[in-house]
Amino acid sequence: MPVSTRSQINTNPEQNEPNQDQREDHPLRNPHHGLKEKMKALTLLYEQQKKSSLSLKKEANELKQSNVMKENTMPNSTVTRAFVLPQPPIDEEKENIPAANGDGIVGFSCPRKSPVSTTVVRKLSIGSSVLPQSDPRGVAGTQNVNEFQAISEKQSTGGSRILVFVRLRPTAKREKEGGSRSCVRIVNRREVYLTEFATENDYLRLKRLRGRHFTFDASFPDLTTQQEVYSTTTAELVEAVLQGRNGSVFCYGATGAGKTYTMLGTVENPGVMVLAIKDLFNQIRQRSCDSNHEVHLSYLEVYNETVRDLLSPGRPLVLREDKQGIVAHGLTQYRAYSTDEVMDLLLRGNQNRTTEPTHVNETSSRSHAILQEVSRFFMVEYRVKDASNNVVNRVGKLSLIDLAGSERALATDQRTLRSLEGANINRSLLALSSCINALVEGKKHVPYRNSKLTQLLKDSLGGACNTAYDANEEILQVPESETDQAKLLLELQKENRELRVQLARQKQKILIIQAQSLAANASPTPSSIASHLSTPLSTQPNKKLKPKSTFLAGNCFTPESKTVGELQRAVKALEAEIEKMRKDYELQIKQKDEFILELSLKRAKTASGEEEGMMKRVVTRESLRPKKKIEGEEGMMKRVVTRESLRPKKKIEGELKSSSQRQVLRVRGRKEDDELVE
Ligand SMILES: Nc1ncnc2c1ncn2[C@@H]1O[C@H](COP(=O)(O)OP(=O)(O)OP(=O)(O)O)[C@@H](O)[C@H]1O
């Protein structure tokens, strides 16, 4: 099954790359230039692997029986080394011509029993070599990383907007023990050599090894760190999302190839997703001109062509097309404030994923295969100031997709539900490749509707994604007074949060005191109560509490001779004091809430006044450009989302009600105040 393909026709990037003027003159230039050619090579590879998979399976069964490893083409010593493969024989077939051309990409999946599984990461890259200001590649600082960086930059400057990478994972212990052989050798940073072994019963080809070369944007050997993989494959895309674009990262490979390891990783070695989230938050905090940024997270799975919300499981979600594009109606959007919070949500979502043992894994790894395509969407909105001091509102979307194990698509020997799963996964992967092919060929019709997965990814493959040229951004002329108000609003919100925390602490203390009081009644031990009571209070920064703690320590509890009655009186006095403080805090919070509400309403009024033509000036990149229809995107509407449209009108009110309510935003139908341009 083809995964992804892309190549560049010419080898000299200077010759090929249009200069800036040319780019502007040809806004419809196909950004996936040459991708189709590699699709062909990928199809060939898939067929080869299928054959290889069958022969390896057969071979493994025979080996099991005889418990003797017989290799007809490779010395035993090579078995233990993942990357030691025989040198390509003289009659090797150079199937992938782009390798000879010095450029090109082919994605491939691995045979099921291959000791070196590979993971193909696909991303829609940005069209320039813009790197994040704090590019983590600099942190890694290895020579390899620099090479990767050069590769990546070359690709981006060459106009490639879809990049394909391959990652090899280390040989698993059971694979070594089972006598599996490695069939992949990384020739250099971009070139990979795949060997097709002949089985001992295949007399005609016994002494013949077949091999093929494939070229990727970068290949990662088994010792590559997660950080290197992230820096080379995704850091640039995060930067693009921060510029107001949409982007996607897919992970493709057979079960056990290391997709989840690459995307999610482990606590010690966090994967692409975690590193991307960290980067996203860091960059937004640095760049946001008014700290008024929002990151929303949705987490869903597509299983047997059914879309499910993993953060709030329930009935299947229906896909609907509205001004925002295709949305899963009712999908939960959590507003996330930190990386830790995102990780908690993802862990929660993972528990709701559909997992089943497969025929394949029951007999080999006995592990569970995850059968669904899982997507995580991060919607990012923040405001920056451009060179002319205009406030620019940017909205970007990052989709991270952990595709189903590709062998599910091949598992035609399985019946009933498994067959259905295989068919549906096949359908999704086929639909995905059809869409990419259509985009590559610049076709007017891109068949997004062929599967739920492609429908959901429509705006990350086309539209304002990195394969197109428009970013979701608008320039707002914000009056100075409004900026001040926004700052004040944020400060007040922060203060409110702190007050709430203090209030919660005080409530906790009341509970402790009540418990201590009960314990004192049962068995009075004044000194222990005193230590319990005085310690937390004396650590309070609040000045009001200090005299009280001194009072407790000095007058009430220190002498052992105090009676239970005195203790109870002290507890009551303390409770009364805390109650008073609680009321004070609540009053303060209420006043501030009212003030914030007033400010918000004022701002909302100003915004609506602007919309009526009084003040607001909305400039999009598109409006500055001569009106031309984007080829291949006919029928798609460019969406410019205003700041107000992404913030439901009653949200601030809702946010102030409770912290749990504040986080949940349900997408219910259309947002009426979205602004539609073109
Ligand atoms: N680069 C790597 N370094 C070390 N261990 C790895 C690497 N890649 C994968 N592994 C290990 O290989 C095993 C299988 O990986 P993983 O679960 O990520 O596969 P997968 O492709 O997601 O499979 P599935 O399709 O079943 O979800 C795991 O134990 C994982 O820790």
Image (cartoon, rainbow, N blue to C red):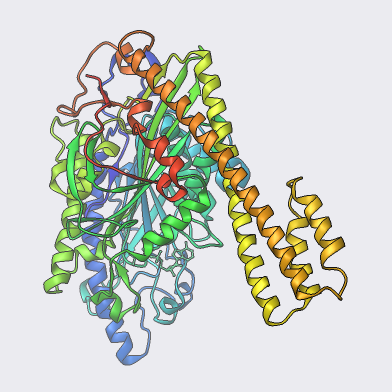
Quadrant housing residue 469: top left
Q: Locate residue 634, reporting x and y percent.
A: 15, 27
Kindly identify the residue that appears in the image at 34 percent across and 31 percent down: 649
The picture places residue 440, in percent across and down from the top left corner, at 23, 35
Q: Quadrant of the C terminus?
A: top left
Q: Is residue 160 visible?
A: no
Residue 312 in percent (x, y) is at: 31, 57
Tally of marks: 0
User: In the rendered image, is residue 624 in sight?
Assistant: yes
Front residue of this view, candidates 244 and 92: 244
Q: In the rendered view of the protein, which quadrant contains the N terminus?
A: bottom left
| Residue extending furthest toward the bottom | 66
Q: On the rendered structure, is 224 left or right of 108?
A: right
Towards the viewer: 12 or 596 = 596
The answer to whether residue 637 is above or below residue 517 is above
- Whether residue 640 sits left or right of residue 414 in the image: it is right
Specify the quadrant of the image occupied by residue 669. top left
In the displayed image of the protein, which residue is found farthest to the top?
Answer: 614
Query: x%, y% of residue 268?
Result: 56, 62
The residue at 48%/46% (across/down) is 277
231 or 678, which lies in front? 678
**Residue pictured at 25% horizontal, 25% vertical:** 638
The image quadrant in which ligand 1 is located: bottom left
Taking 621 as reference, is 519 above or below it?
below
* 203 relative to 263 in the view: left or right: left
